[in-house]
Amino acid sequence: MGPEPLYTLRFVYPDSWQVDLRGEGGTEEEHFLFAEGSCQGRITGRFRGANHPRRRTDRTAVMNLQGFIETPDPALILVDLQGYGRSFARSQELYAAAGLSSEATGSRRQVVGFARHVSEHAKYRWLNDAVCSIVGEVRSPVGVPSDKIKQADVRLVFSVTEMIWEPPPE
């Protein structure tokens, strides 16, 4: 058994705030962003959340996103997403190494991380001890100068996959 695809999460940040912390070691950023979107797949529903990431001096964003998925059942699933939004330079380096450089990827950054879920609904209770991986992208509009892009125009797409337990080697 291997990883099992769980859902694709697509969202935007319609509202955001930022504080820059300048010091001897460079500038870090603290952000607060509201998230709105939806997920499709084994879990389907409306997504809402808030991300409070920190952007390090190496331009890596440390994701700290909590929210919820409301399913059509109806059920409520709380979500905790942690990980890294790789810097633009690092993302471009990795796209090139994988042979994926293109006009589209030229305006994107990579996201990697993990997700945890909690639900009291019987259909989704199995999520309460599941660990999931995240691979995704921050997709800025193509052909628009970065100083002209509004946060609400940036789309985020995450593939969330359940990690299936297997016994370790003897």
Image (spheres, rainbow, N blue to C red):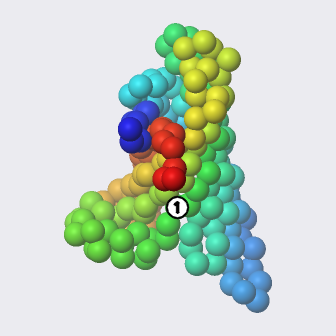
Q: Nearer the viewer, residue 27 or 83?
A: 83
Q: Which amino acid lies under the numbered mark 1 shown in the image of this protein? A: Gly
Q: Position of residue 124 (x, y in %)?
A: 56, 20
Residue 40 in the image: above or below residue 51:
above
Q: Is residue 35 visible?
A: no
Is 118 placed left or right of 131 in the picture? right
Q: Quadrant of residue 48?
A: top right
Q: What residue is disc 1 on?
A: 85
Q: Is residue 41 visible?
A: yes
Pointer 1: residues within 10 angstroms few (<14), some, or many (20+)?
A: many
Q: Position of residue 88 (x, y in %)?
A: 44, 71
Q: Nearer the viewer, residue 165 or 147?
A: 165
Q: Position of residue 8 (x, y in %)?
A: 41, 37
Residue 165 in the image: above or below residue 71:
below
Dot 1 falls on a residue whose secondary structure is strand
Q: Quadrant of residue 42?
A: top left
Q: Residue at x 51, y 44 (%)?
A: 167
Q: Residue at x 66, y 57 (%)?
A: 53
Residue 105 in the image: above or below residue 168:
below
Q: Residue at x 54, y 36 (%)?
A: 36
Is 97 placed left or right of 162 in the picture? left
Residue placed furthest toward the bottom: 24
Q: Nearer the viewer, residue 134 or 19?
A: 134
Residue placed furthest toward the front: 170
Residue 78 in the image: above or below residue 53:
above
